Image (cartoon, helix red, strand yellow):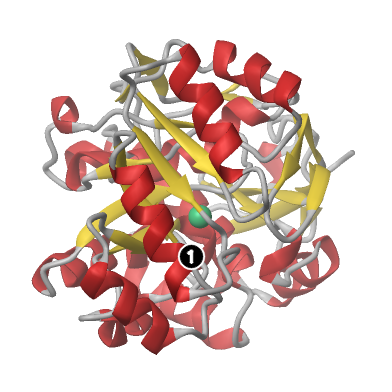
Amino acid sequence: MGLIAASAPISLSATGSATRKVAKRGTLNLSFKPYELQLRHAFNLARYSRTTTPDVQVQLEYDGIVGYGECSMPPYLGETVESVTQFLSKLDLSQFTDPFRLEDILAYVDSVAQGNRAAKAGVDIALHDLLGKIMGQPWYKIWGLNPEATPNTSFTIGIDTEDVVRQKVKEASPYKVIKVKMGLDKDQQTINIIREMMPDVPICVDVNQGWKTKEHALEMCHWLKERGCLFVEQPFDKTWIDETAWLREHSPLPIIADEAFQRLPDILRFKGVYDGINIKLMKSTGMHEAHKMVTLARALGMKVMIGCMTETSCAVTAAANLAPLVDYADLDGNLLIANDRFKGMTVVNGKVTLHDIPGIGVKLIN
Ligand code: MG
């Protein structure tokens, strides 16, 4: 499928290269195309299951240099291919003649409509990729970060039958941290299987709002602590502020927010409620605000995790540029899909590994 040009009067080819010479010089030319992500395994969470993720691939071209971006839309976040393409079609980036006016460009994108966080992230990521390519440097270097300082990334095991859990635990063997999805009645069974097969690997737990009482949650936190769990993510419904603050006060494990927040100002109300935050580019509207969120969370004394949706290596690698700043990384979204278009960050001995590739650090492979 060809790309849809937002403001430029032309469509780009599927690879984004064939018609580049007719793009308007000296301006930003945005184009995009829907791209459904095929999942390797059905993805089972406490609240739903799915086998594909809607996605839109974005390109931002300036004088023959192309930046890549991506919008991934897991259904619970409320965006769709239609809403994203509608939003992107409204943008007129050709008004900007200097791509380095990143603050102005992203403020304009943010002002066009409320919400649309994944759509905005797609533009933000493509702009960062473009600027990094023009400067000839990857973003972790532009931000002054040490690529050796990245944490291990976790590998996610969903809620499933015993056989599937065993198969996934085998696949997880190269990883140094296992993230376990919880919130249904098989919680303890899943942990017991993992502990039987991998007795020593640290685990973390993502409840995806699935626990229903404070007492059960606290009991589980103690039970998990004894089994080498590092932290618990989003134990309760995102609106349960008092219950979460109570659990945080009593729990032997840190409590991390995910569904409970999206953007920078949301973090201000978390002091005393959560111990840390899971930043994802599709919530934060991209890399620019995600970087500010790390700074604010640190100022509030909070732990920071960088996560992702099911995404190609494009958005996952964009997020990985922040990995040297965080305590925990959960950047396995590209490994969960069967039709990745990019090669980017890799996981070596369980650790997020950044490469010296300008921009966000990806190469298009198909
Ligand atoms: Mg989560």
Tag 1: amino acid: His
Label 1 sits on residue? 216
Seen in the picture, residue 344 relative to 47 is either above or below; the reply is above
- Residue 4 in the image: x percent, y percent? 81, 54
- Nearest the eye: 291 or 234: 234
Task: Tell me which corner region of the image, top left, top right, bottom left or bottom right, holds residue 292.
Answer: bottom left
- Residue 129 in the image: x percent, y percent? 43, 43
Seen in the picture, residue 147 relative to 290 is either above or below; the reply is above
Seen in the picture, residue 124 relative to 77 is either above or below; the reply is above
Query: Horizontally, is 291 left or right of 283 in the view?
Result: left
Task: Tell me which corner region of the image, top left, top right, bottom left or bottom right, holds residue 92.
Answer: bottom right
Quarter of the image containing the N terminus? top right
Element carrying mark 1: helix
Residue at left offset 37%, top offset 31%? 153
Query: Horizontally, is 86 left or right of 61 in the view?
Result: right
Residue at left offset 58%, top offset 56%? 122
- Residue 216 in the image: x percent, y percent? 48, 65
Residue 164 visible at all = yes
- Nearest the eye: 99 or 246: 246
- Nearest the eye: 69 or 272: 272
- Residue 93 in the image: x percent, y percent? 57, 69
Query: Horizontally, is 148 left or right of 265 in the view?
Result: left
Query: Horizontally, is 72 left or right of 327 in the view?
Result: right
Seen in the picture, residue 200 relative to 120 is either above or below; the reply is above
Residue count near mark 1 (Cα–Cα under 10 Å), binned few <14, some 14–19, many ≥20: few
Quarter of the image containing the C terminus? top right
- Nearest the eye: 108 or 311: 311
Residue at left offset 49%, top offset 13%? 197
